[in-house]
Amino acid sequence: MSPRRTAPNSRGRVGVAIPAAGSGVRMGGVRKVFLELAGRPVLEHALEAFLAEERVVSVVIALAPDDAASPPDWLTSLDPRIVVVAGGDTRSQSVRAAIAALPDDLDVIAVHDAARPLVEWALVVRCVDLALGGVGAVAGCPAVDTMKVVDVDGAVLDTPDRATLWHAHTPQVFPAAALRAAYEAVTGEGTDDAALVERCDPNLKVMMVDGGPGNLKVTRLVDLPLAEALLARRPRNGP
Ligand code: C5P
């Protein structure tokens, strides 16, 4: 038995919401979650780490409405825990639709962008363990570049202290009640899930979890060969 299974947080019911309904505007309108990386769709890679986690009881994937109406066979036959719903016009709407379709009796909910195919099982476990302890857990990595605050013309307004800045990735994992409350209470868009939780419940501690720079989001065409190279070097993605 692995040491993790004897840890205090080794029990818990985990739901996963996967927003996958983007239109791929920055890729020229390509449905990037169905693009193949190393012979398998980006979405399948993104699901791997969650399906390998035994505490995950349900995975709801928000697809573009026409894809949700006739999802691909490989997806519907991949794992009995998978449910497909129609996403919305924005990421927040898609996450909201996915959360609504998760079971009621969950301890924590993880949100993960389908566009991050390199997520590792060990990172999922670290974030889930933290959230089961009652805090929010946001995968990310410290900023290595100096960051600038600019106006609409690109003129520099400020140079914040880099030591205080992190990139926020996914998964972002929260106690289920806190995430549901945030998506019910906060209207409008957040650029990530933690932003909504922070606004809804400023007293909930949210921790950054260093998942390294390799958990990249496939956003532009140039990201594809990079993601493929990183996938080729990745060890087995599971317990
Ligand atoms: O556009 P961006 O790369 O930030 O999208 C992050 C994730 O949100 C992607 O997995 C994308 O498919 C998803 N998304 C969604 N519904 C939208 C827009 C984006 O599920 N309307």
Image (cartoon, grey):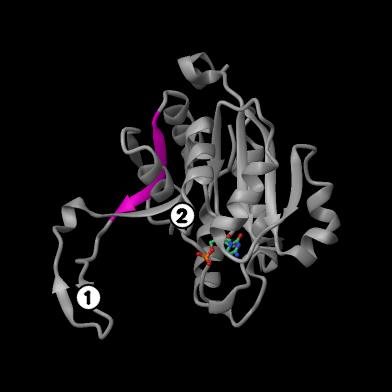
Residue labelled with disc 2: 215
Residue 49, horizontal then vertical, whole percent? 59, 42
Q: Is residue 123 left or right of residue 77?
A: left
One can see residue 128 in this view: yes
Q: Which residues are magenta?
A: 135-142
* Other-residue count near label 2 (Cα within 10 Å), few / some / many at <14 / 14–19 / ≥20: many
Residue 125, horizontal then vertical, whole percent? 50, 33
One can see residue 2 in this view: no
Q: Secondary structure at mark 2?
A: loop
Residue labelled with disc 1: 150
Tell me which residue sits at (50%, 71%) in the image.
223
Q: Quadrant of ligand 1?
A: bottom right
**Of residues 73 and 148, which is closer to you in this image?**
148
Q: Amino acid at mark 2?
A: Asn
Q: Is residue 220 above or below residue 129?
A: below
Q: Which mark is residue 183?
A: none
